[in-house]
Image: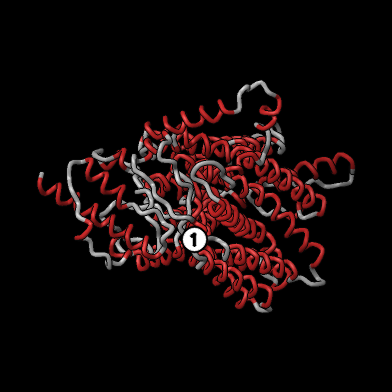
């Protein structure tokens, strides 16, 4: 008992050292010595402030950055203490099945487009043979070269079909992603992630039927698959929910690394998926084989979720989130009021979490959330919108065929994966040091994350400037490798965003970013492809000038993000008691300088 008391005394004294050091740096910060002494006194102990070394550096006392305020201890894993390892959530439970899912996602992209092209070609040629008796109908063979399909009418209809598919999936996922994110806060991450995989699984089943029975299942049935994919959130919601799972079981200082693992899996799937699919289709001689493998990957993921992967949200936290949601719904009673009913159909309603009001919020928090989400959306939108333009551009400028373009995509994505899985964890370890044995504190977005975000944007800007200036293929590849270093910015941005809200709002926040990503998925490619179409042959690099300028704007936004601010959960709120039972003391965000 005596040793336990001594350990408690040491921990409490260290906490007071942190408070006094911060108080000297910023007198506006609340002094937590009385709080700690009261807690100590309530436990029947004593503490002597005269014995405290007031010159103890802040970094040594807390393991946090110099100047960071004393914040609430992160206690995300407290509800799982004492459980065996196979029942404790960890980001590593999710990585392997997620990797297989992303490889399947990347692997079916080209075969699906080829299947749609072949199905539409069959229809166009059949109609032409009916209207033109002299036309010789050459059969279309799935998975084989079909030169008879290389006609403008087929190409135009395939482009139109792809546009409809992306619009259906993108708009529906924009509606569904925030809802699914909020539901995951109340009912757990696993079952909602399973829902997203069921949507993708349904799409693969419909695609297989369309490929197997083309006379019965018209090509437009594949659009129904896009509908199921979108209404279940698509890969955008799956990525956001995976980040929510990682947030639940990862301390704040390591979240950028955890999110980087998921981004690494995604780009690994995009890089190697098409190559694997090509070899599988070549070996089997059947384009449907890749869809069967993708179907199996989704089934495997769902089985992993049901029987192996532990839930990251405890029953207590789920119940607390449901009670909070119930109270919020009661605030808008009566439910029959048509204005309140209309609010439920507002597509942008989930974005209100980016502008929080009420106890615990502040102008600095709102500014940070808006700026960080804007930068995150810009980086995602540019990444999604630039892919197709780059592939078309290298064919026009350098005469690259499928092999050269595939090699370029593989090189760039391989560099991105190395940055996410090797360089980002290494930099984080060097800067933050080895994990502390003391409880981790949430300090909001810190200076390290902001430096990393800004540096990543600089690499993206330099890379796209290189695209603009390159007149040889080797320099274009080098520019792509430089831009790939900027891939470290996306997981860091997501990590920084989660550190601004309480744990019971993580899913809602990432659902809102999923909405922005879904909108960017629809809008960005449309803008960039339209610009390229009107400038190609005149000022072909105009689209890259715009992309470079867009990154410059994102960098400007990042300069106004302040470190060490977050939503302070009021001491008397039920959520606070359910979260960790501790008192959060927080500095005035406006007193923290921009660094």
Q: What secondary structure is found at the residue carrying circle 1?
A: helix
Residue 10 sits above or below residue 175 on the image: below
Quadrant in the picture for residue 538:
bottom right
**Front-lying residue, 234 or 315:** 315
Residue 66 sits above or below residue 196 on the image: below
Instruction: Please name the residue that numbered disc 1 is placed on.
Output: 591
Q: In the displayed structure, does residue 136 sit left or right of residue 464?
A: right
Q: Residue visible at 30% across and 41% down?
A: 78
Few, some or many residues within 10 Å of mark 1 (<14, 14–19, 20+) = few
Q: Position of residue 47 (x, y in %)?
A: 20, 52
**Front-lying residue, 126 or 277:** 277
Quadrant in the picture for residue 23:
bottom left
Q: In the displayed structure, does residue 45 sit left or right of residue 321?
A: left
**Does the rendering let one see residue 265?**
no
**Front-lying residue, 1 or 440:** 1
Q: Position of residue 585 (x, y in %)?
A: 39, 50
Q: Residue visible at 79% across and 62% down?
A: 533
**Does the rendering let one see residue 40?**
yes
Residue 525 sits above or below residue 454 on the image: above
Q: Position of residue 580 (x, y in %)?
A: 34, 41
Q: Position of residue 372 (x, y in %)?
A: 56, 56
Q: What colouring does the structure picture have?
A: secondary structure
Q: Residue visible at 76% across and 63% down?
A: 532
- How many badges with numbers are in the image? 1
Q: Quadrant of the N terminus?
A: top left
């Amino acid at each position: 008992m005596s040793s336990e008391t001594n350990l408690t005394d040491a921990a409490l004294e260290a906490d007071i050292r942190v408070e006094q050091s911060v108080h000297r740096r910023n007198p506006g910060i609340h002094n937590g010595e009385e709080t700690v002494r009261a807690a100590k006194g309530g436990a029947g102990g004593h503490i002597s402030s005269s014995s405290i070394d007031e010159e103890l550096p802040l970094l040594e006392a807390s393991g946090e950055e110099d100047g960071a305020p004393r914040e609430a201890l992160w206690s995300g894993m407290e509800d799982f203490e004492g459980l065996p390892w196979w029942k404790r959530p960890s980001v590593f439970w999710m990585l392997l099945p997620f990797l297989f899912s992303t490889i399947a996602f990347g692997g079916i992209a080209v075969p699906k487009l080829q299947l749609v092209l072949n199905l539409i070609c069959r229809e166009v040629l059949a109609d032409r043979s009916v209207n033109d008796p002299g036309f010789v109908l050459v059969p279309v063979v799935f998975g084989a070269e079909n030169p008879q399909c290389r006609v403008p009418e087929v190409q135009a209809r395939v482009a139109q079909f792809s546009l409809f598919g992306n619009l259906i999936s993108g708009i529906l996922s924009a509606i569904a992603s925030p809802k699914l994110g909020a539901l995951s806060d109340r009912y757990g991450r696993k079952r909602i992630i399973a829902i997203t995989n069921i949507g993708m699984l349904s799409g693969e089943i419909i695609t297989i039927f369309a490929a197997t029975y083309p006379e019965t299942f018209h090509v437009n049935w594949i659009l129904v698959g896009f509908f199921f994919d979108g209404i279940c959130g698509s890969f955008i919601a799956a990525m956001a929910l995976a980040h929510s799972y990682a947030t639940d079981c990862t301390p704040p200082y390591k979240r950028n690394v955890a999110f980087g693992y998921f981004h690494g899996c995604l780009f690994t799937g995009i890089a190697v998926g098409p190559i694997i699919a090509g070899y599988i289709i070549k070996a089997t001689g059947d384009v449907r084989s890749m869809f069967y493998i993708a179907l199996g990957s989704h089934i495997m993921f769902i089985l992993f979720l049901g029987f192996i992967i532990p839930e990251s949200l405890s029953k207590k936290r789920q119940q607390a989130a449901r009670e909070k949601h119930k109270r919020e719904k009661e605030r808008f009673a009566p439910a029959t009021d048509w204005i309140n009913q209309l609010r439920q159909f507002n597509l942008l309603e989930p974005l209100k979490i980016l502008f929080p009001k009420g106890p615990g919020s502040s102008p600095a928090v709102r500014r940070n959330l808006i700026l960080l989400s804007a930068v995150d959306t810009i980086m995602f939108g540019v990444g999604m919108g630039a892919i197709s333009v780059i592939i078309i551009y290298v064919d026009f400028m350098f005469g690259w065929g499928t092999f050269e373009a595939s090699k370029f995509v593989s090189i760039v994505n391989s560099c991105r994966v190395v940055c996410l899985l090797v360089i980002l964890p290494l930099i984080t370890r060097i800067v933050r040091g080895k994990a502390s044995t003391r409880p981790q504190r949430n300090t909001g977005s810190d200076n390290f994350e902001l430096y990393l975000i800004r540096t990543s944007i600089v690499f993206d800007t330099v890379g796209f400037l290189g695209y603009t200036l390159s007149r040889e293929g080797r320099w274009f590849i080098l520019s792509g490798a430089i831009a790939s270093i900027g891939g470290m910015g996306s997981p860091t941005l997501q990590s920084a965003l989660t550190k601004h809200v309480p744990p019971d709002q993580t899913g809602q926040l990432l659902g809102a970013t999923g909405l922005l990503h879904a909108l960017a998925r629809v809008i960005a490619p449309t803008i960039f492809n339209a610009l390229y179409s009107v400038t190609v042959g005149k000022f072909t690099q105009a689209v890259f000038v715009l992309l470079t300028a867009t990154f410059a704007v994102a960098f400007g936004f990042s300069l106004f993000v302040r470190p060490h601010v977050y939503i302070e959960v009021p001491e008397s709120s039920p959520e606070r008691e359910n979260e960790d039972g501790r008192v959060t003391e927080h500095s005035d965000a406006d007193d923290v300088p921009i660094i």
